[in-house]
Image (tube, rainbow, N blue to C red):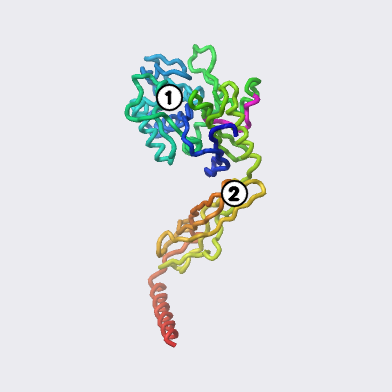
Amino acid sequence: MDAQSAILMDAGTGQILYQLNADEARPPASMSKMMTEYLVSMAVKQGKLSWDDTVTVGENAAKQIGSRILLAQGDQHTIRELYIALAVYSANDATVQLAEEVSGSEEAFVKLMNDTAVEMGLTQTHFINSTGLDRADMPEKFRPTSVEGETTMSAKDAATLAYRIIHDDPEFLETSKLQEYKFRPRDKTPMKNWNWMLGSNKDNPTLRKFAYEGVDGLKTGHTSRAGNNFTGTALRNGTRLIAVVMGVPGTTEDGKRFLETAKLFDYGFKGFEKKTILEAKAAVPEHETLKVKKGKSKTVPVVTATDITLMVPKGATAEPVLQEVRQAQDPLVAPIEQGAKVGMAIYKYKDPSTQEEKTVEIDLIASEEVGKAGWWTLLFRGIGDFFSGLFKGIVDLF
């Protein structure tokens, strides 16, 4: 890999298939806008904003540099228009305005970004603004005083953030895959998507060599300090992968970051296959039942609620080893409905791609209903248990 850091992740499970300096904190440039996108979308989902809200552009947005759509102070646009400008064209001015609409100020929004990063488990991420610009490139009046340093993020954190976007806000991919967007009716040319890897670019003579089948997102990033960065995602034959490259040498015009990303996708799609190493609705050997009190039956049959499916290098295998079975309650008490969670099975296995030891917990569910026994049954069962215990005690004397 010709990059300072990189990672390849299965978007279905978060399994890491490849990594290079993946925990190294680096300047992400505009890849940090993924968090802005996520938080704006969440604000809409929570009813704090509406896509159709019309907002007035403020001074901070109007003074942004770099990639922008030339917003002037006092301009009015909808949240949706600004969001598309952010997602497609990586517009710094649209990004800042959206941040202010969510939190009142960009600096307050940055606190939300950092709090959310902690909640997501992004351990090598620190935001100072909504755009990913270096502090010196921000409008001087609006440089933050409550946070120090510069924005940093690791490749692993970028992939984890992309994973959360794909799972929590899959509709975003409908925006990120747009090849172009005409922001104003009077604009002579539409904004072009900086993501040259979009699968739809296969018909574009200029970008055809970068187009990769199945790519529909997510975010580019470039500054002189960061180099060339890209977080991409591609879906092929039901498998979605997330790839991140950071610090790719060269220029934005040579497109090398996309060629390096293609190497990661090829490695994943061509070298791995999905394998189910533990089936759902399967009995656990030697733990086919759990004990139940006050039920018509003294035990309840149990099966796994879900499977364990991994991306495995072609020709390789992985074997889960049972570590422990725990009951949800001790003791289980009838009545128990069919399908109710009654325990969990804990397995360990060696990740076939990274060779790391992994632990996974699988819920155990009742495969049959166990009704509550009547008092008459419980009475005679108690008498039987009493005499059985008494007889055993007598035998033990001899």
Q: Which residues are magenta?
A: 208-218
The residue at the far right in this view is: 315
Q: Which residue is mark 2?
A: 352
Q: Tell me which secondary structure the magenta stretch mostly adopts.
A: loop
Residue count near mark 1 (Cα–Cα under 10 Å), binned few <14, some 14–19, many ≥20:
some
Q: Looking at the rendering, which quadrant does residue 233 occupy?
A: top right
Question: In percent of the image, x 55 and y 63: which residue is there?
Answer: 285
The residue at the far bottom in this view is: 398
* Tag shown at residue 134: 1
Q: Is residue 163 above or below residue 280?
A: above
- Please tell me which of labels 2 and 1 falls first in the chain: 1
The picture places residue 136, in percent across and down from the top left corner, at 40, 21
Is 54 part of what is drawn in magenta?
A: no
How many numbered marks are there?
A: 2
Q: Looking at the rendering, which quadrant does residue 41 occupy?
A: top left
The picture places residue 131, in percent across and down from the top left corner, at 43, 25
Q: Amino acid at mark 1?
A: Asp
